[in-house]
Amino acid sequence: MTSQNKLTSIIIKISGVFLATLIMYATPQISAQEPVTVNSDNSVTITYLDPKAEKVEVQGTFFKKGNSFIPMAGMFSKDGKAEMMNIGDGVWTYTSQPLSSELYWYDFVVNEDSVRYDKRNKDTTRDIGTTYNYFIIKGGVGDNYTDALTKKGTIKYDWYPSALNGMSKRRMVVYLPYGYKSSNRRYPVLYLLHGSGGDETAWADCGRLSQIMDHLIAEGICEPMIVVMPNGNVELAAAPGDDPNNPNVEPSGNNVSSMFGKFEKSFVPEIVTYVDKNYRTISDKQHRAIAGLSLGGLHTLYTSLNNPNEFDYVGLFSAQTTNALGDKSVGGLKRIGEGWKQLKEVLPFLGGGSVDRKISNITGGESDPNLDIYDNFDWKLKNFFKKNPKLFYIAVGSDDFTKKLNDDLRKKLNKGGHPFVYNESNGGHTWSNWRKYLVDYLPRLFKN
């Protein structure tokens, strides 16, 4: 071989090695052992193992449609999705575009009919009756959703005595800040309420309450506080699977029975009284806050308006701000069918099947005395603000189906000259928004 040919051969070999190296570092490394890999550009490579699958699609909150993320909120919207690539040996893979800092949910559609999550990924969350996998992109708001390395608070599952719906006890989840057990200090309290279909575990699970609190307290962004998360579903004493009265109940997104005022009426005498008796609280209005999302916003609004001396801080996240079932024009349960129709017009996720039949069955009954919790709204609102609350906070997404309800409430507040803080975000009725609202709400509480 001539010297020139040897030189050419060497150059080709070097070029081949160089090209292979470029490909190796430019292409996300796919490992069947790793369900999720966050790449250097914040794209994410997801793998799924199923040798028998003929087609696998991944769906989740990280897909984009135009310039907007497609939200995942169960019955409220459809997830974006994409077909995964079969690279052999039953390994399916998909790599996303670079993502901003956030917590993202995903699951899989297998053979176009079976929706599954990946059991190899221990990071799961349950929203109503569906389990999702999730991953976190750091470098922004997502940092608040990661587990703290030190100074962690604790989560306690606590049963309290209750007469609601003939029960003897109900369960709440309580967050105790780092240092609670080792001191005699007393703390302010935030009561944090879930939405329809949720339960006492929703904020701790989907909402990442413990992680958010640990980070914000450690960074001095919010005050150390106790957070109480009760179960607002009046038919269940605890989350599905943990309720001794209903061991086989299936989670449901329709929670109409919790819109009759029973939960709001029991809130202060049962929940607040128990918490003040059993935890080291500062038991006055100035050190007590309440906030809730969706149905929990309805509970928050009317619990606070009917107890104007109990809460100095009120937070409404994508709140259901009205309840036609309690409207005077309905005339109580005797004409509840009319009220149900009105309510479904403003809250499109309600109704259907067994729920409509349940409403039909009680139409014509006697008026429920608990519905008076929703009466005289304008007077109660005016009376509440006479007590000079420190914060009335409203947050909602620009695409949220509760947006008009919240706009109407803001008009009432403006007309009455009542001060409030308004936070309008992009997107809709999603946990992504509710977590961000919580991060924005917490630093505003219990400041001198």
Image (tube, rainbow, N blue to C red):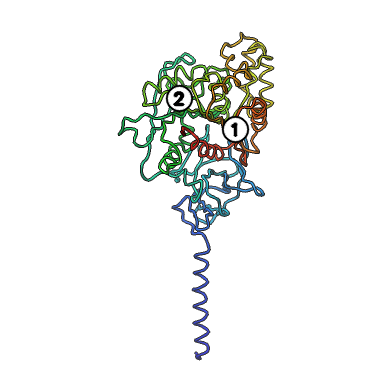
Spatial separation of the CA atoms under disc 1 and disc 2: 24 Å
| Disc 2, SS | loop
Outermost residue toward the bottom in this view: 2
- Which residue is labeled 1 in the image? 318
Place of residue 111 in the rendered image (x, y in percent of width and height, measured from the top left)? 58, 44
Task: Check if mark 1's residue and mark 2's residue have beta carbons within 8 Å.
Answer: no
Outermost residue toward the top in this view: 366
Outermost residue toward the left in this view: 182
Query: Which residue does the image show at 51% across and 59% down from the upper left?
Result: 28
Q: Is residue 142 visible?
A: yes
- Which residue is labeled 2 in the image? 238
In this image, 98 relative to 185: left or right? right
Out of 21 and 327, give the one closest to the viewer: 327
Marker disc for residue 235: none
Q: Which corner quadrant of the image does residue 211 belong to? A: top left
Out of 377 and 255, give the one closest to the viewer: 377
